[in-house]
Amino acid sequence: MTININWFKYSSPASFYPLAGKLTPWFFVAAALLGIWGAYISFFVAPTDAQQGEAYRIIFIHVPAAWMSMFIYVVMAFWAGVGLAFNTRLSSMVASALAPTGAMMTFVALWTGSLWGKPMWGTWWVWDARLTSELILLFLYFGFMALQAAIDDPRRADKAGAVIALVGVINVPIIYFSVKWWNTLHQGASVSLTKSPSMATTMLVGMLLMALAFWMYSIAVMLMRLRCIILERERNSDWVKDLKERQP
Amino acid sequence: MTGPRLTDALRAVAGRDLLSAMRHRADLLTTLIFFVIVASLFPLGVGSETALLRLMGPGVVWVAALLASMLALARLFASDYADGTLEQLVLAPHPLTMLVLAKVAAHWLASGLPLVIVAPLLGLQFDLSADALLVLLASLLLGTPTLSLIGAVGAALTLGVRGGGALLSLLVLPLYVPVLIFGAGAVEASAAGLGAAAHLSLLGALLLAALVFAPWATAVSLRIAVE
């Protein structure tokens, strides 16, 4: 039996708006449950690190935030690119809705990294490869948002934002490796796919649960922001005027 | 096909831009003097110890060159956008990517090359050795065209946009980071006796990559701007 769902139906803002409204609470619930479970494992079950003591537990926030900051940039560039190539309004709106969340994740990663650096390295900031490229990623997010905010015509803002997001996504690896060769102090990647994890399994489970919670949260917030953007852009259309939520 | 050939069109575009740059010599000089002033401010800020200056020299000259070439970017498309020339370029029968390349080349000859030529003088202020000066020259020669190419994308995106200048720097400066690292790194590596070949090769690679991608992205951005 095949289920026939017309996915293209949801590429129209008018039909995606109610769907986004229905999905948002589910993603929030998923984020809360995963977050509570992950936080419990991270702070009560996971063992104290032999070298770093209790302070290492900040990585349960830091690493998921850093993962999400990079992942969201790629997703944002992907949807912006789809919007540019196929001229679909909703894709570009998704990209605009993702940018603030991505910037926030980048900021959280930098902030927690600096909190972790103080007890470990004895300094709030080092010009280490990953910290520096994360900082530049934050600038790229700011550039994307500032460019979109400066252009009044939403369609032009979408397309211009798409170009800068795609240019950025090509540049992120180049920036990363250039900064890495420039200087590196950072400990090796905590989780690697090529070799067995160098950490206890409970720590890994806690980190993955937290990453999933961050992921669900990002989707929920993105959907909320997307609904606002849709309403703002389509405020003159009939379907917005007929929305039940607007009826007195 | 009748009408001008591509090579003629490219020569016409580049020639016109160079001529117009020569007629506005004051603009070019302003960028150049900005470059010299910024680099001269650093010793005043951090003190005139020769050892410190020698260490900082390559980085300071590179950062100053980066800022100066960014300042010059605003001129790349602005007047063409204002007087409608840009629309004619977009409508022209030749590929916009190639025309953009001609414009960027002319822009670099007018505003990038002078920076490269003046840079060794600034290097002398920082007491760089003769070898270091040569490497500085080579790294700027390879790096500044990349800056112009990347900057062209930002210049095209910010055409006619509110707060263009500050926005342009926000868009373009993060993308300049690799060029800065390898450019200044080349001089530092040669000063440390490691040889600059690796850094210069990477700068060349960045230039080639920018030559392929940047004119295309600039052309897309220009179409968006004149739509």
Image (cartoon, coloured by chain):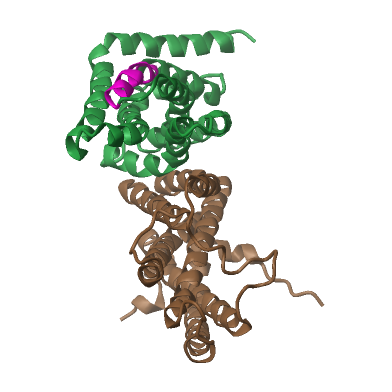
Chain colours: A brown, B green
In the rendered image, residue B67, in percent from the top left (x then y), is placed at: 31, 33
Looking at the image, which is closer to me, A1 or B153?
A: B153
Say which residue appears at 69% left-offset and 66% top-offset.
A195
Residue A238, position as x, y percentages in the image: 41, 64
Residue B63 visible within the image = no
- Is B64 rendered above or below residue A95? above
Residue A196, given in percent of the width and then of the height, sits at: 69, 71
Looking at the figure, which quarter contains the N terminus of chain A? bottom right
Q: Residue at coordinates 31% horizontally, 18% vertically from top-left?
A: B121
Screen quadrant of the C terminus of chain A = bottom left
Q: Residue furthest right?
A: A1
Above or below, A167 relative to A223: above
Q: Nearer the viewer, residue A51 or A95?
A: A51
In the rendered image, the residue lying farthest to the left is: B44
Question: At 48% from the left edge and 30% from the top edge, which residue is drawn?
Answer: B190
Is A161 colored magenta in this rendering?
no
**Residue B54 visible in this rendered orientation of the protein:** yes
Position in image of residue A54 (x %, y %): 44, 83
Q: Identify the magenta region.
A: B113-126
Q: Quadrant of residue B19?
A: top left
Q: Is residue B1 left or right of residue B107?
A: right
Give the answer, above or below, for where B178 lies relative to B211: below
**Viewer-nearest residue: A231 or A205:** A205
- Is residue B75 shown above or below B217? above
Does A61 sit left or right of B31 as displayed?
A: right
The verdict on residue B115 being magenta is: yes
